Amino acid sequence: MSKTYNIALLPGDGTGPEVLQEGVKVLKVAAAKFGFKLNFTSYDFGAARFLKTGEVLPPNASEELKKHHAIFLGAIGHPDVKPGILEKGILLKLRFDLDQYINLRPVHLYPGVETPIKDKGPKEIDYVVIRENSGDVYTGVGGLMMKDSPHEVAVQNMIYTRAQVDRCLRWSFKYARKYGKKARGVGEHNTLALVGKTNVLTYVFDLWERAFNEMGEKEFPDIKRDYYHVDACCMWMVKSPEWFDVLVTANLFGDIITDLAAITQGGLGIAAGGNINPEGVSMFEPMGGSAPKYTGKNVINPLAAICSGMMMIEHLGEEKAARAIEEAVKNVTSTKVKSLAAGKMGYSTTEVGDLVAERV
């Protein structure tokens, strides 16, 4: 008996609906081929709703989304809405309300895709960043004193509990065991490396480092452990990305280094990510943003959205279908698209979706 998955669609703003449409197109083909069903329900959360009603999210939004197996997001952001309103009111709120405490960012350079790093290819740029997604300065703890005066004080606190750190690390160790380079047959070890700043942020990253080593020794002795200061990590992402396997880091550092990682794999047009609650509802999205200037032109690159859909069904347990989508994307990048840039692919948005769907 085939499985059925209920998927919430959040097309969002700008080119979000266009890329999400191509992701759904490919998922439908994969579902038909591999014998499972996908039921899609669309929600209008985004700029248009906010500009019309003044409401970012309805009060029951999070509870409504919990009824689904997963959430598939297009993009959030609009030039007519002040920065932060939609991002905090939709993306951060949903991440916190749904306790999506893992942000998963694969960094894979696909064949045929250009990277700005000299002499590096798919073999070298092949790792994963796991970003803790519920703590850090993103919790909003802090405030302003004497605003707009010469003595104004701004405080935003980096906060972590041991429970938050432990659950992220445990998931990361398990991920490294299942998907690390040794498990994939491309390396001698499954390695998990902590990225932090133990020499300056001595309280928060003392907690992270102690938890990392204690858990590794007691529960995951088969996983090789490593450590990088975040500034050194940025340098090695450019100089020697082949050193990396699975990286785990705090929320703020993860936000920064995943954008650096994205450009090394060809840019945000190919970068996909997941906001994961291992015990609940997870949300998957392309990393490129809403790109409003390209809205309606049918020129935006949908591959990041397609890869996000791939991550979603892999998370749901449909790994064979996910691998088929990934192989189809690799074929398209190596044989068809000229560039990942909007308007320079040699194909329209819908045609790129068609190319991937045909190969699945």
Image (cartoon, rainbow, N blue to C red):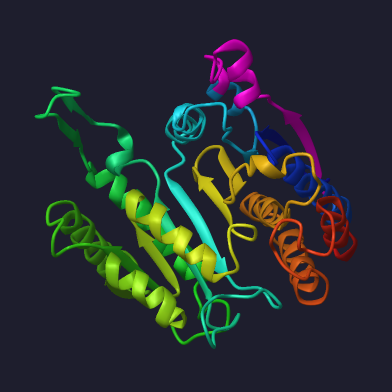
277 with respect to 52 (left or right) = left
* Residue sitting nearer the eye, 334 or 323: 334
Q: Residue, x 54% and y 88% (percent of image)? A: 119
Q: Quadrant of residue 50?
A: top right
Q: Residue, x 33% and y 71% (percent of image)? A: 233
Position of residue 254 relative to residue 53, above or below, is below
* Residue sitting nearer the eye, 176 or 327: 327
Q: Residue 85: percent from the left, percent from the top?
A: 46, 27
Q: Quadrant of residue 208?
A: bottom left
On-image quarter of the C terminus: bottom right
For residue 45, say whether it is visible. no
259 with respect to 321 (left or right) = left
User: How many numbered callouts?
Assistant: 0
For residue 133, say whether it is visible. yes
Decide whether residue 179 is among the magenta residues: no
> For the magenta stretch, what is the residue range?
36-61
Outermost residue, top side: 53
122 with respect to 146 (left or right) = right
